[in-house]
Image (cartoon, coloured by chain):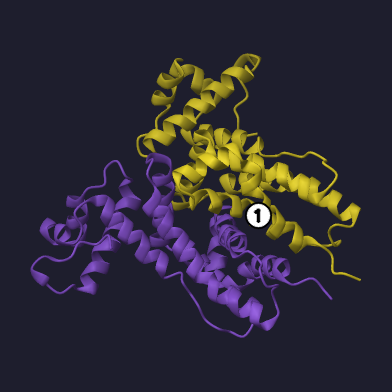
Chain colours: A yellow, B purple
Amino acid sequence: MSRQATPLGRPRDPELDEKLMTAALLEYAQLGWGAFTMQGVARRAGVGKSALYLRWSTKEELLLDSVESVALTLSVNVDTGSLTGDLTALATALLEHFLDPIGWATLRITIDVTAEFTDLRPFQQRIVKALRSAATGAFTRAVERGEMATGTAHEPLIESLFGAVLMHTLSRSHEEREHARTHPGEHVAPLVDVIVRSARPPKK
Amino acid sequence: MSRQATPLGRPRDPELDEKLMTAALLEYAQLGWGAFTMQGVARRAGVGKSALYLRWSTKEELLLDSVESVALTLSVNVDTGSLTGDLTALATALLEHFLDPIGWATLRITIDVTAEFTDLRPFQQRIVKALRSAATGAFTRAVERGEMATGTAHEPLIESLFGAVLMHTLSRSHEEREHARTHPGEHVAPLVDVIVRSARPPKK
């Protein structure tokens, strides 16, 4: 979609793509938007500028794809047999994401973009898409199992769970973040519980 | 606490304090941590550097106080007679906070600080304090009214509500953010509902 078709039908190299996107996120994390250049990303990745421009025509496109590629790794959709289990898998992936420098860089880009640019549509759409796809499977299965009332709106539950993990990360000290890294389950359990309790159907 | 006692017992000027802290947040929003200086804040506020140094000995102290003073405006504690009403007041204040350039700058500082510094304790403690004090009153009254089971943990509910509002702001387009500015109630209602449903005591 947003990625340019490679000229002359040259095949993509997914490993190189990923290396370049990682370099872009790290470059951004260090310099911010003001000093972020294609040149700098190429230098960091140890490639020529042309290798970048073959793939992305602007630095905005490069950042968009980089943010999306990281966001999509959050689309954990495993069937553990219970809503609590499924959401725990999801929330754990998100917690690890926010505890990782690359994940944190992604968040910073999103936040800077929200502050700086007026047309945020592509960024917002990609974030929303990643969040939705991550939880839709879990909620659909929960309705089938009777753990959740039919017709319950997904989006507020998704925003609450993902937002809670973000806020949890933001409001913890360095030591507590280290503890979360080694014991993610203890940290996400109370947050998952809020959502599971909220989603449960009224007792007959 | 962190603010220096003014030398010679000179009385504080709360209006000037606020003007300086606002200048600090705007300066940070524009330049980020790397280019943030006391000199720049003084210039923006139209005061001499000495006026700043009389109040804060370092730029870290200045930022800490600025973030805290904004965070404390979120401590909305009104008794509307229902948990839904109380949390709506709170969530609306938070939504307006995230839609305001000063509030957004505060968030960016917190996020940059989490990425850059190892000793985050003062920042984290002040955020946690503001969040807790904002919701504790609402939850205490809800337990008294029987809308919430005794012994329900407050913190996961607070993280969920505040995080949901943040995530909602982050994942919305420019137009949707404008809509939220004029119709905050429509935007916070589904998020408040998640928390109220989660907190309700089990049916007898």
Asked which secondary structure carries label 1, the reply is: helix
Note whether residue A87 is visible: yes
The image position of residue A92, as x and y in percent, is 66, 42
Crowding near pointer 1: few (<14 within 10 Å), some, many (20+)?
many
Q: Residue at x 54, y 41 (%)?
A: A179
Residue B18 shown left or right of residue B179 in the figure = left
Q: Residue at x 55, y 52 (%)?
A: A168
Residue A74 shown left or right of residue A168 in the figure = right
Q: Closer to the camera, B138 or B171?
A: B138
Quadrant holding the C terminus of chain B: bottom right
- Per the image, the residue denoted by label 1 is A191
The image position of residue A120, as x and y in percent, is 53, 49
Q: Closer to the camera, A91 or B101?
A: A91
Q: Quadrant of residue A159?
A: bottom right
Q: Is residue A190 above or below residue B13?
A: above
Q: Residue at x 56, y 66 (%)?
A: B180
Residue B11 shown left or right of residue B153 in the figure = left
Q: Closer to the camera, B40 or B1?
A: B1
Q: Quadrant of residue B62?
A: bottom left
Q: Quadrant of residue A148?
A: bottom right
Q: Closer to the camera, A161 or A23?
A: A161
Q: Residue furthest left?
A: B8
Which chain is indicated by disc 1? Answer: A
Q: Residue furthest front?
A: B151
The image position of residue B157, as x and y in percent, is 62, 63
Q: Is residue B181 above or below residue A85?
A: below
Hey, what amino acid is under mark 1? Answer: Leu
Quadrant holding the N terminus of chain B: bottom left
Note whether residue B26 is visible: no
Q: Is residue A179 above or below residue B46?
A: above
The image position of residue A64, as x and y in percent, is 55, 37
